[in-house]
Image (cartoon, rainbow, N blue to C red):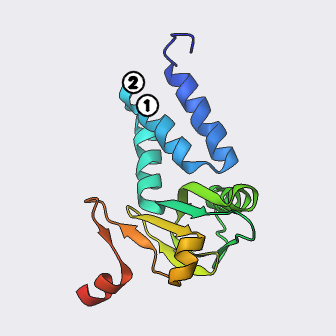
Amino acid sequence: MLGVEPSLEDYMLGAYAARELGQVLSVQERLKSAARMHQSKDIVEWLWKIDNTYGRVELVSVPPRSTTFEAGVMPFDPDQRKAVEAAIKSVADDGMFVGMLPLGEFTFSGQAFKVEPGLSVRIEVSPRVRRQGPIAPVIVYPDGKPVDAASEATQK
């Protein structure tokens, strides 16, 4: 690194570039850095929209071969569509995706899961997991505590 702190403009241009690539997590990180320098209405509203429209997702398949990722319904919103398309490409190329997806229902290697704002979802598909049979995705609530689908069903 050159030892030069990025400017507000640098962070904003980076956020716009990340948005075009469907990398919502990078958008959020850059906007938070920009907000530390200058809290404008536009930055706060953009962060609010991300927080209320997307959820954090970590999808991992070991080995990555024959891994699939599908959206139940492809979003119409262009930014959300780009985020889903980026996840599809990442899973196809690397067998994994770490980032943010818009709220909705998805399938990763045959495992259905739902993305909700403010929640984190982690799904691992590996030989060890495959031997144990399908397990429910791990959902982490904002307080940081994971809740599996079985205990979630008993809470309802």
Q: Residues within 10 Å of mark 2 (few under 14, many from 20)?
A: few
Q: Seen from this angle, which residue lies furthest top?
A: 3
Q: Residues within 10 Å of mark 1 (few under 14, many from 20)?
A: some
Q: Position of residue 110 (x, y in %)?
A: 63, 81
Q: Quadrant of the C terminus?
A: bottom left
In the foreground, 154 or 43 = 154
Please name the residue shown 53% across and 28% down the image: 11
Q: Quadrant of residue 80?
A: bottom right
Residue on which the image places disc 1: 33
Amino acid at circle 1: Ser
Please name the residue shown 56% across and 49% down the image: 24
Q: Position of residue 35 (x, y in %)?
A: 40, 32
Q: Quadrant of residue 138?
A: bottom left
Residue on which the image places disc 2: 37
Q: How many marks?
A: 2
Amino acid at circle 2: Met
Residue 10 has which mark?
none
| Residue at disc 1, secondary structure | helix
